[in-house]
């Protein structure tokens, strides 16, 4: 009964509306038939970050047209859909409610069951959509805008937390550092681009908790260090111009005004040094997790998994240790509907969960992955 089942997935937890259709198979992993995505980045850019109310309203506008697009692209009709899946959390409450509401309304109208999915489980299982899918068990490095976690994954639904950030997430460290460098939102990809021409060893930035053997992360101190360094660079450039010695810089206020007027090479050096600090911590902790668990497979998922330097360093270090590394396809690293449809299909197929015809819904803006 679970073969050739069509699962429609809806993602609306933050600033991307994603819809996708996957089909379960008699053997192997489900296949992706079509997916469509609308990114709200442009809309939020003027505000320097995601505005939750605007995000919810835009999801409402996009979700049904994207659903039509996915059905057309896959040559399927709504009545053929067997299960409607949606992101139940974590994420922005209002944004999640849009996806949940639409999914439950579609399910009720079609007389088909619905299933709420954990957003991070979607990221975690997204490499199964790639041409080189992983096999269980593996260590997962989940690095998104809101989460940084190392997990041991033994099977679908069997997730043991090995370590996580005690403050900011890796994506947040990229975004906040990029913001004070005047790179706008979302900062991760922009900072990575600027870092390409910079020297990663130009500035000594902290590698928090690197020396500790535990697998927790801490990135909040890094952005303060980046801010102090940026202020110091602005002050010495001003001193150079005026001939008056620069005062000692302190992060006494959050402003890095003037940084964007510095020569490109200096800005690129700070971007490269920041990226190097984040990447080194992520790589070293992943290697410790592999050593502690004795596992020979690493899965990297979440938006920061698109980072080229992270991929290069993980590939190099894992090759030395005969560890296989799996990533989602680049375009499925950030939020999308395909990972939600895929996670739902894999949960249903594994018998872990059944879809429900109770169309009352709630969402879970905060929802630890190891509690599902
Ligand atoms: O997984 P995701 O799309 O959304 C959340 O669930 O949070 O991750 C978004 C995060 C943002 O912080 C973004 O800046 C970061 O992923 N990101 C990157 C890159 N592409 C996206 N960070 C560094 N380098 C990139 N190439
Ligand atoms: Zn995400």
Image: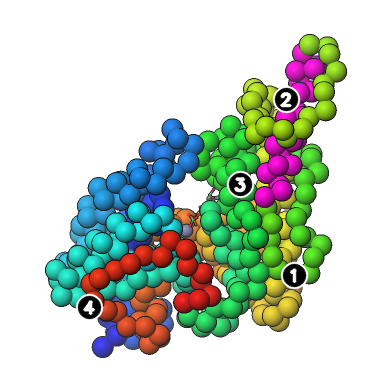
Q: Which mark is residue 357?
A: 4
Q: Under tag 3, what secondary structure?
A: helix
Q: Earlier in the sequence, mark 1 or mark 2?
A: 1
Residue 326 lies in the magenta-colored region: no
103 left or right of 372?
Answer: left
On the image, numbered disc 2 is attached to which residue?
Answer: 234
Alpha carbon separation for disc pair 1 and 4: 43 Å
Report the mark closest to the observer, 3 or 1: 1
Residue at image position (70%, 68%) is: 215
Question: Can residue 272 be seen by looking at this rendering?
Answer: no
On the image, numbered disc 3 is attached to which residue?
Answer: 174
Magenta range is: 220-241
Some atom of ligand 2 lies within 8 Å of the CB belonging to the residue at label 4: no
Q: Which mark is residue 367?
A: none
Report the mark closest to the observer, 4 or 3: 4
Some atom of ligand 1 lies within 8 Å of the CB belonging to the residue at label 3: yes
- Answer above or below: position of 307 versus 216: above
Residue at image position (20%, 70%) is: 107
- Answer above or below: position of 116 versus 45: below
Q: Quadrant of residue 310?
A: bottom right
Q: Position of residue 71 (x, y in %)?
A: 22, 62
Q: Under tag 4, what secondary structure?
A: loop
| 1 and 4 marks in contact (CB < 8 Å) | no
Q: Which mark is residue 214?
A: 1
Alpha carbon separation for disc pair 2 and 3: 20 Å
Residue at image position (76%, 53%) is: 207
Dominant SS in magenta: helix
Q: Position of residue 72 (x, y in %)?
A: 20, 59
Q: Earlier in the sequence, mark 4 or mark 2?
A: 2
Alpha carbon separation for disc pair 4 and 2: 60 Å
């Amino acid at each position: 009964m679970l073969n050739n089942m069509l699962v429609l997935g809806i993602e609306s937890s933050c600033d991307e509306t994603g819809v996708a259709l996957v089909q379960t198979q008699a053997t192997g992993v489900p296949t992706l038939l079509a997916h469509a995505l609308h990114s709200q980045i442009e809309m939020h850019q003027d505000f320097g970050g995601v505005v939750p109310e605007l995000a919810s309203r835009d999801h409402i506008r996009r979700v049904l047209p994207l659903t039509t697009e996915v059905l057309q692209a896959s040559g399927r009709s709504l009545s053929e859909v067997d299960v409607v899946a949606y992101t139940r959390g974590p994420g922005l409450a209002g944004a999640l409610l849009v996806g949940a509401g639409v999914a439950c309304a579609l399910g009720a109208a079609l007389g088909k069951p619905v299933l709420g999915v954990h957003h991070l489980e979607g990221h975690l299982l997204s490499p199964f959509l790639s041409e080189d899918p992983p096999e269980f068990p593996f260590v997962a490095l989940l690095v998104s805008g809101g989460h940084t976690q190392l997990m041991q994954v033994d099977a679908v639904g069997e997730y043991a937390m090995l370590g996580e950030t005690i403050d900011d997430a890796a994506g947040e460290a990229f975004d906040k550092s990029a913001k004070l460098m005047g790179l706008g939102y979302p900062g991760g990809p922009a900072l990575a681009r600027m870092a390409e021409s910079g020297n990663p060893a130009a500035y000594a930035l902290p590698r928090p908790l690197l020396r500790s053997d535990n697998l927790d992360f801490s990135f909040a101190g890094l952005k303060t260090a980046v801010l102090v360094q940026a202020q110091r660079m602005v002050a010495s450039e001003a001193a150079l111009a005026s001939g008056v010695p620069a005062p000692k810089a302190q992060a006494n206020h959050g402003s890095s005004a003037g940084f964007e007027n510095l020569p490109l090479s200096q800005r690129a050096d700070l971007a490269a040094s920041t990226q190097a600090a984040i990447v080194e911590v992520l790589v070293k902790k992943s290697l410790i997790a592999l050593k502690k668990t004795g596992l020979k497979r690493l899965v990297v998922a979440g938006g920061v998994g698109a980072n080229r330097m992270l991929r290069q360093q993980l590939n190099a270090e894992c090759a030395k240790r005969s560890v296989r590394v799996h990533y989602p396809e680049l375009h499925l690293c950030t939020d999308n509907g395909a990972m939600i449809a895929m996670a739902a299909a894999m949960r249903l197929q594994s018998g872990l969960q059944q879809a429900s015809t109770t169309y009352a819904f709630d969402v879970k803006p905060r929802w630890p992955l190891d509690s599902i």
